Image (cartoon, rainbow, N blue to C red):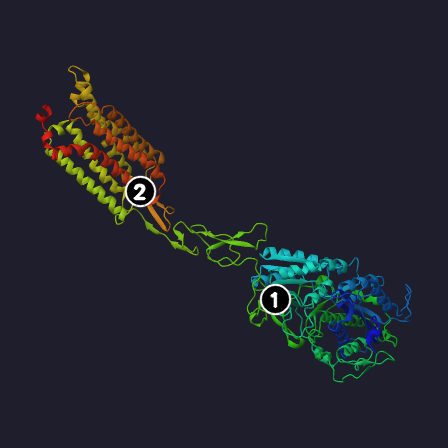
Amino acid sequence: MSFDVLEEKHKVSKDGDMVIGGFFPLYTYQNTEDTRGPGQPILSMQLQSRNYQYALSLVFAIEEINRNPYLLPNISLGYEFHSALHTDRRTLESSLTWLTGVDKHIPNYTCRKESKSVAVITGPTRTSAQIGTLLQLYKFPQLTFGPFEPILSDPGQLPSLYQMAPKDTSLAFGMVSLMVHFSWNWVGLIISEDEKGIRFLSELRGEMDRNGVCAAFINMIPVTVLLYFKRAHIQYSQIVKSSARVVIIFGDTESLLAVSFKRWDNLVTRRIWVTTSQWDVTTSKRHFILDPFHGALLFSHYHGEISGFKHFIRTANPSKYPEDTYLARLWWMHFNCSVSKFDCKTLRNCSSKGSLAWLPWHHFDTAMSDGSYNIYNAVYAVAHTLHEMLLRQEDVQQLKSGKGPVFSPWQLHPFLKNIKFNNPAGDPVIVNQKGQLDRDYDILNFWNFPEGLGLKVKVGTFSPYLPHGQQLSLSEDKIEWATGYRQIPHSVCSASCRPGFRKSPQDGKAACCFDCIACPEDEISNQTGEYMDQCVKCPDHQYANTEGTTCLQKAVTFLAYEDPLGKTLVCTALCLSALTAAVLGVFVRHQHTPIVKANNRALSYILLISLFPCFLCSLLFIGHPNTATCTLQPIAFGLVFTVAVSTVLAKTITVVVAFKFTAPGRRMRRLLVSGAPNFIIPSCSLIQLTLCGVWLGTSPPFVDSDSHSEHGHIIITCNKGSVTAFYCGLGYLGSLALGTFTVAFLARNLPDTFNEAKFLTFSMLVFCSVWLTFLPVYHSTKGRVMVAVEVFSILASSAGLLGCIFAPKCYIILKRPDKNCLKKVWN
């Protein structure tokens, strides 16, 4: 005969002076195959072995109190518990049966002459709310053992209900701290679509956003069966296809969320599940190591070890509690017993040595769960409340009779609200919700061994009361990861950027999804991780290495004499200076020859002497700059070139005057004879000297450093000071050169053997071309190259004057002396 003939709503009771009731979820939804069609899942009700621990914890606590001579002496406690069914109608029927004592319910009427019931323990949330709505009409004390539910804490709706579970206000913070510890920033969320789940999701998303953790997907499991089956396939596909290796589960163990994983546990693998201890991860019936929940991490409220509970579990059997039909059904299910057809309770052919401790892990756990611990505390809370009430009575004996206590259950409320005590494990118990504080969490790791043997191993703790950074403590060496992982798994949307790279967000994706791009020049990132949002710019005196990982000290450099470019320019300047001196020597030696005396011999000497410092002034731009050289550069450059160009202008005017205005008696002839063109040189030089004085007086040049022109170098240069003054001086010199070129160009065809107008024209063409080319090149270069361009322009323009004017004359003097005589000229 089968136990199917037994009604699931059958009660189990044991009499006492005072009775504590209980409604426990002993039956749960299970998946079965519909015989009407293959592969069609349906839901059925089956006795859940693991949940039977709730009933045993109630019996254990009552028996322990009855043996205690200091708590409720001479008063015995009894119990009566029912299976909390999963429909509103059947739950209401069970609660009315418990209240009235009859199966046929008559409102406001009870067949019991005197009720011994003083309180009831209920759970989970939906059952507590349904029963609480009825019990609050009678002001009957109700204590819940399930997870803390904000919807049950409203004293206006459920004033007679007390929650024994501590609040989970720091659970989201603890889970996110675990994510941050293992650098998991790509996490899936599977949450029940009820009020508590939505509130937890809001808290969790807030913590995730603050700590840089992103949600790969969010699966909200519906609370209705019809909507659940519509979404089941889509939600399963999201889990399987997602790259997230870590998934957070949050929801009621009796909800459709549990049904989902009972359907998927054979398929969803290689995931790290993070959930609470109330959520039953041991749903798999497979007896081998590839359980998909192997390696799950569970957050469990810390509580002390209850002495004697495991021994009580091992010794509980139907012969010890013959009135317990649920215990008999467990023996029938797991130990191959048969049942008598006469009373449907007597077991036959059973082993006398059977024990619940022999059952596989996924069927029954001897360690006290959080729910059982809350039931244990609830029984002790009622006992301490009754003890306090009895102590305040003047005559305890008057309250004791063979028929039980004479007070009503509603009288417990004033005492129950203020009760505080330490349970036998030493943990403080506070029934008043306002006085409850967050407890520390134990972090458990689920190990699944072959043959269904499982174990929850404590691998860490989380305390919201410790300083930041010390709240999470883990022993990583104890953690068994999910099947397929030998090391800490990675759960990130994008791999961490290497040093030298930074994150670049991907359009339309979460912040945890990014590309890695190299840092710009002179910027580094020396950290490895997805949190390196920006590269850091190196200081001006440092530069980034080629990998972009560290800043190196820049080398101080300048256009030095030792550099190849510096050596070349110095040698060129010295050679041209020596050449100028040689030309001057040739002219002095042959000063009485016609070609030297022609076109004003004195102006030729002045021009050669001025070209000599023109070449040498370029040396001021080479070498380590200092205040003296930076100050002398504009003065030397401006003055010597002004003298040279004005000398060329004087020579040009001399030629023009000599050929155009040399008729006897003309005033211009007297000017030529008197040497008036020679006054052009000091006049032009005085103007340039004035400009230089203003420049030095207002914003003189100074020593400056250029850390950007050359990678890895700090170039020491002379800053021009006033850019306006610099271009004024350069513009004046250019205007003088342009005017000289114009005059020489007009006089280029004047007839005479020793007429140098053509040479002067060509020299000024070279001079102007050099400095016109200088301006764009000067602006397009930086650092040492800019200084080199400036030096080259000085040497090239000076060499142009020297070569174009004096090279033809030296050729005649040295190579063709026959042309350098008056006789030749006359012929």
- Point out residue 572 in the picture as x, y percentages from the top left corner: 22, 43
Residue 721 visible, this angle: no
The residue most toward the top is: 665
**Residue holding disc 2:** 787
Q: Determine whether, in the image, residue 48 is placed left or right of residue 807.
A: right
* Quadrant that contains the N terminus: bottom right
Secondary structure under tag 1 reads: loop
The amino acid type, in three-letter code, at marker 2 is Val
The residue most toward the front is: 37
N-terminal label among 1 and 2: 1
Quadrant in which residue 195 is drawn? bottom right
- Residue at 32% x, 45% y: name it: 784
- Residue 443 versus residue 231: which sits nearer the camera? 231
- Point out residue 708 in the picture as x, y percentages from the top left corner: 38, 46
Residue 185 drawn above or below residue 791? below
Residue 776 drawn above or below residue 412? above
The residue most toward the left is: 823
Quadrant in which residue 410 is drawn? bottom right
Question: Residue 173 has which mark?
Answer: none
- Point out residue 763 in the picture as x, y percentages from the top left corner: 23, 32
Marks 1 and 2, Cα distance to the nearest angstrom? 66 Å
Say which of marks 1 and 2 sits in front: 1
Quadrant in which residue 627 is drawn? top left
Q: Determine whether, in the image, residue 674 is placed left or right of residue 559.
A: left
Residue 821 drawn above or below residue 142? above
Secondary structure under tag 2 reads: helix
Residue 323 visible, this angle: yes
- Point out residue 754 in the picture as x, y percentages from the top left corner: 15, 27
The amino acid type, in three-letter code, at marker 1 is Arg
**Residue holding disc 1:** 270
Q: Residues within 10 Å of mark 2 (few under 14, many from 20)?
A: many
